[in-house]
Image (cartoon, rainbow, N blue to C red):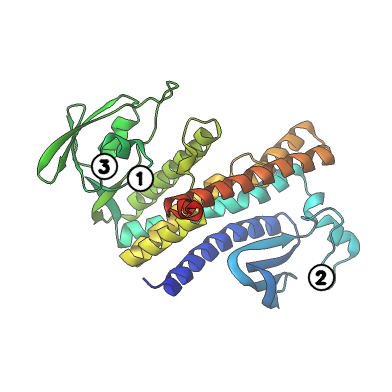
């Protein structure tokens, strides 16, 4: 795939997922009487905009990555209003500020974005399940990360897992079930007609259980589902992916998992490119996968993320009064710093995988 088409695919994927996320905030905000000043696809200078009957400016902005929804008062309680709708008084506008809403309403508005991403994923996966089918995976390794314990132990791309701990393996899901037990793995793998015996120790040097070994499977076939089964399967997949990603981030935070597993923008770009090359169904599947991750990560109780707002609103709801403004600003700054560092770590890891860091320091 050409670089231009790859970039367009990447921009399309990110724009759709961010638009879904921000629409979730917008819908819940309006339902709770919050005035939404602007909704933008993209960031930066505004290319074009249209005013709707609710007084919201719908925009397309110059930088095609991301987007935003601007609610009255979300900058601060005295933030400048872009527009005042007809037949609305200053007093009424003041009450339509997000700052004037009750803690449980702020909580719902914050939940709207992540919830929209998760619902989007369920809808997309349900459609895929009925039209194309959910993939069933072979016991053949498609990719093995060079930094993973699987690669270091001897597993390679194309290896067919015959058995683990004397248990025959036919589907990749069986491998995941065994890994979750936390027991050391005695693997028999077929490679070029020969059987390789590989041992993987499932505890690190500190005695912590390793939850993943760093392999991805090869797709066997797609199996179509009925409507009811498709919804159920989609909900299970969404829940599983969300929990696994939240768990992985928590493990990285408490140093139970390598920071090398953190990916950045380049990883997402490569995922979009590879998925698009495999066809439209693969690209849509990847979008659903990323939507789940976006929704799940935003639920983490970290200031700056939606989960941080949910946490603060919950505390204010319980204690019956707002938290100290200086304290809130301080923890939001800490959260912003943490998220920024995590993003930089992802970019660093991406560049390291591309050998860019090594090349940069070679004399």
User: Hey, which quadrant is residue 282 in on the image?
Assistant: bottom left
Query: Which residue is tagged 3?
Result: 172
Q: Residues within 10 Å of mark 1 (few under 14, many from 20)?
A: some
| N-terminal label among 2 and 3 | 2
Residue 134 or residue 334, whichever sits in front: 334
- Which residue: 46% across, 36% down? 258
| Residue 252 position in % (x across, y down) | 51, 36
Residue 43 or residue 147, whichever sits in front: 147
Residue 93 or residue 18, whichever sits in front: 18
Residue 56 or residue 281, whichever sits in front: 281
- Which residue: 74% across, 32% down? 318
Query: Which residue is tagged 1?
Result: 145
Disc number for residue 83: 2
User: Hey, which quadrant is residue 284 in on the image?
Assistant: bottom left
- Report, in whole angstroms, how far the alpha carbon at label 1 lies from the one at label 2: 52 Å
| Residue 218 position in % (x across, y down) | 25, 51
Q: Is residue 65 left or right of residue 130?
A: right
Disc 2 secondary structure class: loop
Tell me the mark number nearer the camera, choosing from 3 and 1: 1
- Report, in whole angstroms, how far the alpha carbon at label 3 lies from the one at label 1: 17 Å
Q: Is residue 119 visible?
A: no
Disc 1 secondary structure class: loop
Disc 3 secondary structure class: helix
């Amino acid at each position: 795939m050409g670089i231009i088409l790859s970039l367009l695919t990447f921009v399309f994927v990110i724009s759709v997922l961010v638009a879904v996320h921000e629409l979730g905030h917008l819908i819940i905000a309006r339902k709770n009487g919050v005035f939404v000043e602007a909704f933008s696809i993209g960031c930066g200078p505004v290319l074009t905009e249209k005013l709707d009957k609710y007084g919201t400016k719908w925009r397309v902005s110059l930088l095609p990555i991301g987007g935003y929804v601007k609610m009255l008062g979300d900058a601060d309680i005295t933030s400048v209003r872009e527009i005042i709708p007809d037949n609305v008084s200053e007093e009424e506008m003041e009450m339509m500020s997000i700052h004037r809403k009750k803690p449980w309403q702020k909580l719902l508005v914050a939940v709207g974005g992540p919830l929209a991403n998760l619902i989007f994923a369920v809808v997309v996966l349900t459609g895929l399940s009925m039209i194309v089918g959910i993939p069933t995976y072979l016991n053949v390794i498609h990719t093995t990360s060079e930094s993973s314990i699987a690669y270091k132990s001897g597993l390679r791309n194309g290896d067919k897992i015959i058995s683990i701990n004397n248990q025959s393996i036919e589907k990749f899901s069986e491998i995941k079930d065994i890994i979750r037990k936390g027991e050391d793995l005695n693997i028999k793998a077929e490679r070029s007609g020969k059987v390789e015996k590989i041992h993987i120790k499932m505890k690190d040097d500190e005695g912590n259980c390793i939850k993943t070994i760093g392999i991805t499977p090869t797709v066997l076939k797609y199996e179509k589902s009925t409507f009811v089964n498709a919804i159920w399967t989609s909900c299970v997949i969404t829940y599983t992916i969300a929990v696994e990603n939240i768990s992985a981030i928590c493990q990285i935070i408490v140093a139970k998992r390598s920071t090398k597993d953190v990916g950045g923008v380049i990883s997402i770009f490569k995922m979009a490119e590879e998925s698009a090359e495999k066809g439209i169904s693969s690209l849509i599947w990847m979008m659903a996968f990323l939507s789940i991750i976006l929704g799940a990560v935003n639920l983490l109780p970290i200031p700056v993320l939606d989960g941080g707002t949910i946490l603060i609103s919950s505390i204010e709801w319980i204690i019956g009064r707002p938290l100290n403004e200086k304290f809130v600003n301080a923890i939001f700054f800490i959260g912003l710093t943490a998220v920024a560092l995590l993003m930089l770590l992802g970019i660093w890891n991406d560049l390291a995988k591309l050998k860019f860091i090594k090349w940069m320091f070679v004399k």
